[in-house]
């Protein structure tokens, strides 16, 4: 299957595993990764473009004291146009880190993700463990392989996923040059 998603509990190492895999891929990469920036009172969720490393978007700010998440759905439209659609026609692998509940109210973003999953380009992503219609729709696709990681298997999944990418004609860094 060309669409591979990693899932698991919060903090288990999904994005860390994704970063390790990306270091061992030797092809053009598009899509995005998510960064979390912590301050005393907030967590800021940023999407960083892998299509153009200079582009970054704040998709949400969580205020811990208020227990409130603020997000602007228009940002997801920008991500769709400026990262995802450009990656779709121009990259050999698309990274989606991570898809979750914030995207549920962004029709353009969801439609763009479906368009990406329907294309021939391999996809490697992270799915947040949440029960939204959008995430369930992705998980139920026949062309999606969802790999759940936990403390027992997270260290052995890198090679398995790299082999899956190789089967999907994604070029990998030669073993003698493999980056840590």
Image (tube, rainbow, N blue to C red):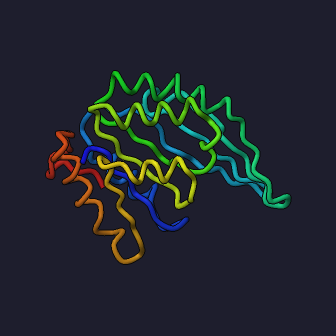
Where residue 170 sits, quadrant-wise, is top left
| Residue 178: % across, % down | 22, 51
Q: Is residue 34 left or right of residue 165?
A: right
Q: How many marks do you count on the picture?
A: 0
The residue shown at (31%, 36%) is 93
Image-based side of 132 in relation to 147, left or right: right
Pinpoint residue 175: horizontal percent, then vertical percent.
15, 52
Residue 174: image x %, image y %? Answer: 15, 46
Image point (41%, 31%), residue name: 115
Tell which of 114 and 125 is nearer to you: 114
Rendered view: 22 above or below 161 = above
Pick the front one: 127 or 12: 127
Residue found at the far right of this picture: 66
Instruction: Name the residue rendered at 44%, 34% in the picture.
Output: 50
Residue 68 x %, y %: 79, 54
Q: Is residue 156 above or below residue 14?
A: below
Residue at the extreme bottom = 152
- Compared across the picture, whether 141 is left or right of 130 comes to left
Relative to 48, residue 52 above or below: above
Quadrant of the frame with the C terminus: bottom left
Apparent side of residue 136 relative to residue 107 in the rendered image (left or right): left
Residue at 26 percent of width and 56 percent of height: 161
């Amino acid at each position: 299957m060309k669409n591979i998603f990693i899932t698991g509990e919060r903090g288990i190492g999904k994005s860390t595993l994704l970063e390790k895999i990306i270091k061992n891929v030797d092809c053009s990469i598009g899509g995005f990764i998510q960064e979390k920036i912590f301050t005393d009172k907030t967590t800021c969720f940023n999407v960083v473009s892998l299509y153009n490393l200079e582009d970054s978007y704040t998709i949400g700010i969580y205020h811990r004291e208020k227990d409130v998440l603020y997000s602007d759905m228009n940002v997801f439209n920008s991500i769709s146009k400026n990262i995802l659609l450009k990656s779709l026609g121009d990259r050999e692998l698309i990274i989606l880190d991570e898809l979750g509940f914030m995207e549920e109210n962004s029709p353009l973003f969801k439609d763009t993700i479906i368009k990406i999953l329907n294309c021939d380009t391999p996809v490697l992503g992270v799915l947040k463990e949440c029960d939204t219609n959008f995430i369930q729709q992705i998980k139920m696709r026949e062309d999606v392989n969802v790999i759940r990681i936990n403390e027992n298997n997270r260290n052995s999944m890198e090679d398995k996923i790299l082999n899956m990418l190789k089967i999907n004609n994604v070029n990998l860094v030669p073993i003698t040059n493999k980056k840590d």
